[in-house]
Image (cartoon, rainbow, N blue to C red):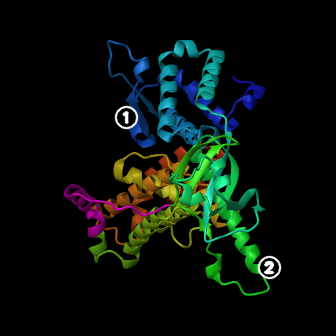
Amino acid sequence: MLPPEVIDAMPLSRETIKSIRRIASMMVQEDEPFDPQSTLLSGFRQAVFPPRLRQQDDPQPTLLITGDEYRAFEESLGRLVLEPELEHLDPQDIDSSLWDLICELFLQKDTFKNAQKRAERVRAYLETIAKPHSTFQVAFPIEHLRLEAPISISGVRMEHWGREKAREWSIYEGADLTDDFAGSTVAVVSVRAGTNNRAIERAKPLVDRALEALRFGYATSSRIRIRDSELIFRQGDKALVRQEDGARSHSWHLRFRPSEVTLSPTLVSRTVEYLQPLDRLASNENLRLSFRKRFSLALHWISTAMTRDDYDEKLVDVCTALESMLTQRSDHRKGELIALRAMLLQCTLEGRFQDTLPILRLYEIRSKIVHGSGINLCGEGQYTHLLGFAGRLVMQAAELSDRNPSVKRFDDFRKTIELEEMLGVAIRWFTRYGKEGQNVVDEAKKRLPA
């Protein structure tokens, strides 16, 4: 076991380190008898060992994790993906590295049954994948604003850039970025980040907040009426980034802009085939209009999320889509019911499920954004995960309705998935999360037959 002072010295959060220790401990335990039914209900993962761990006489060996091991792996992966010190890695890279670790522990369990050696291996793994943040300076051109004197708001400095100032950022006469920055108002802010991309992602909302404050101060402090058309200054579609006081290393086209998409006959055919369950549902007059409307609302909010450029707004839209599909106006704990019913829908349709507690965590981020207790809380990885989950859920709900003629309204849909056996599976699953899953357990118990 790692002593508290060692945990505190490591680069990641205590909760993440403890979750890695938990899965590491599980991987060196003796195997339990294989139970196919339990595996299908609790979820599982089966994949090949990494090449470095394979034996020559067994080119494609696989590892299967189920039950508590699977849940512990998913929890550890979910926590690692959200760690700021790992933002230089893609979620797929983190997934591969964690799988590599547990395969090594499993294959060398005789060695790693020793708690000290196992703790040292976990520490080495975390130190290998973590990367300390650096300080970056990020510069954005500001459109429709000309400043005759510099201004600093909340750590963001805005000023007019002449040719000399532009040359400090390696923008020389005739360069491709000269027209964007030289002769323009530019906002510069310093941020801590692990990569250039993350630096820009982190800096952009800071500049937005500074511009919001500038609009408010300019408009409300003036003795004359300021027209709204005079307050539409905004960030341009490019950004510069450099290590603090260093040479400029990168530039980006930043603003979210449409690009032309070409759909080949094959893609058109595939898309039409994929949408058939939704088409049948939309034209099925045996279904209550209010039930069909849930699907059109879900598609609306998911599509709207795809057109936004702010990840907080994208997250809120996708959560609204999930509310449209899985909750009623009278429901009080909507996030918990989304997690519960999403799990039950998967069990009913496929006989197994993807853990939905991470979806509840993302919904809780949505609540902080909507109720004003936080901004800039969602990143690309979180949004992408939620979007993929929501898309699959809409199609699963359509398929369930298509298969069951008795499902004509939301109450029928709810009763079809809220079966006693499946509710029992949900209660056992979320009970394992302790306090974090208790509200979901409570909602499941309310739906058990008296």
Residue 144 shows in the view? yes
Q: Which residues are magenta?
A: 256-280
Residue at the spot 50% in from the left edge and 41% down from the top edge: 91
**Front-most of 65 and 272?**
272
Q: Is residue 275 magenta?
A: yes
**Spot occupied by residue 293 in the image (x, y as percentages of width and height):** 40, 75
Principal SS element in the magenta part?
helix
Give how far across and how far down residue 354 sits, in percent. Answer: 45, 46
Q: Residue at x 67, y 40 (%)?
A: 246
- Provide the secondary structure element on which disc 2 rests: helix
Q: Residue at x 41, y 24 (%)?
A: 49
Which corner quadrant of the image does residue 329 belong to?
bottom right
The percent position of residue 90, horizontal first and vertical second, equals 50, 40
Q: Earlier in the sequence, mark 2 or mark 1?
A: 1
Write down the residue under mark 1: 36
Label 1 environment density (alpha carbons within 10 Å; few <14, some 14–19, many ≥20): few
Q: Amino acid at mark 2?
A: Ser
Q: Name the residue type under label 1.
A: Pro
Quadrant containing the N terminus in the rendered view: top right
Depicted 37 relative to depicted 159: above or below? above
Q: Is residue 444 left or right of residue 137?
A: left
Residue 7 within the segment the image draws in magenta:
no
What residue sits right under mark 2 in the picture? 221
